[in-house]
Amino acid sequence: MSAVSTTPASHDDAHAGGHEVPYSTQLRSNRLGLWLFMFSELFLFGALFTTRFVLWGNTRPNLSQELGLLATVILLISSFFMYRSETAIANGDQKTFLRSALVAATMGVIFFIMVVVMEWNIFGLSGSLFGIELFGHLKPSDGVYGGVFYAMTGMHALHVLSGVVFILIIWWNGRRGFFTPERHWGVEATAIYWHYVDVIWVFFYPALYLMGKAV
Amino acid sequence: MNDKKAAAYRLGLITLVILAVLTIVEFIIAVYMGALVLLFIIALLKAAVIIQNFMHIARLWQEESH
């Protein structure tokens, strides 16, 4: 969104120097657009969240509490590093910006692995550490529990994965000096999106792991 | 500028601590009480903290650039 086209000739004449929209206006529009996009996504996640209560009621599958808690902590710390990254570029601290973005992406990947490899257990592994069960046993075919669990975690994991891709893109562009303290919408948008993914998990985590009686 | 930068970093750290504490409280409530409404309220609190401090929702109606 770099320029606005207008038809009336008199209006064009009034702006002989071109019709570039001021950056602050672009920024406001970009922010509003991103928030509207996230609001639209809320319907998707809201539907999944509601489905959990309709189909599971006051019960839940018996999942590894430690694994869920650890995954949540990792995602929260990742969000903190993304915030740090955005703050750093806004203050011209290129080194911290790049380093924090990379840490955030790495933690996002760890979260993704924890969900897909450990909780979903796609490789059919088994094992424990200090009495903590490391791999899940719930399958998508396990009735409503499996179906809802995989739909919720799967949709969320997909967003985590896309968030990691966005972070790596801004990291790569940041290395080439693409962002400045004055202009870094890409970083801000990625950070907001990443925090949004975190907000979704803030609701999904208790809904999947904590609420209701384990069966 | 340095004060502003330090304050911003501090806000991030404070937010992380608040979220960590709320997560622990949430876990304890689930294990010992199982109060569904309380868990939902904590989730709302956590979301509000993230939206306010990390996502800067206030910027939506602020006249500012980077």
Image (tube, coloured by chain):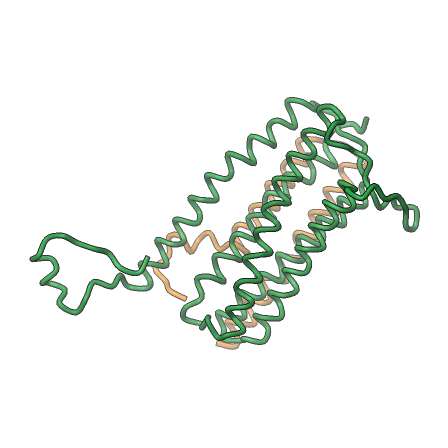
Residue at image position (55%, 33%) is: A46
Q: Quadrant of residue A135?
A: top right
Task: Report the front residue among B27 and A116.
Answer: A116
The x and y percentages for residue A115 are: 72, 45
Up the image or down, A119 lies above or below A113; here it is above
Q: For the C terminus of chain B, give its image quadrant.
A: bottom left
Query: Chain B appears what colour?
Result: orange
Up the image or down, A9 lies above or below A33; here it is below
The x and y percentages for residue A25 are: 31, 59
Residue at image position (7%, 57%) is: A10
Task: Report the front residue among A124 and A16.
Answer: A124
Q: In this view, does B48 lie to the left or right of A69?
A: left
Residue at image position (37%, 57%) is: B62
Up the image or down, A141 lies above or below B23; here it is above
- Which chain appears green? A
Number of marks in the rendered image:
0
Q: In this view, does A32 lie to the left or right of B17?
A: left
- Furthest-left residue in view? A10
Up the image or down, A159 lies above or below A142; here it is below
- Furthest-right residue in view? A131
The x and y percentages for residue B20 are: 70, 52
The x and y percentages for residue A146 are: 73, 30
Task: Report the front residue among A144 and A208.
Answer: A144
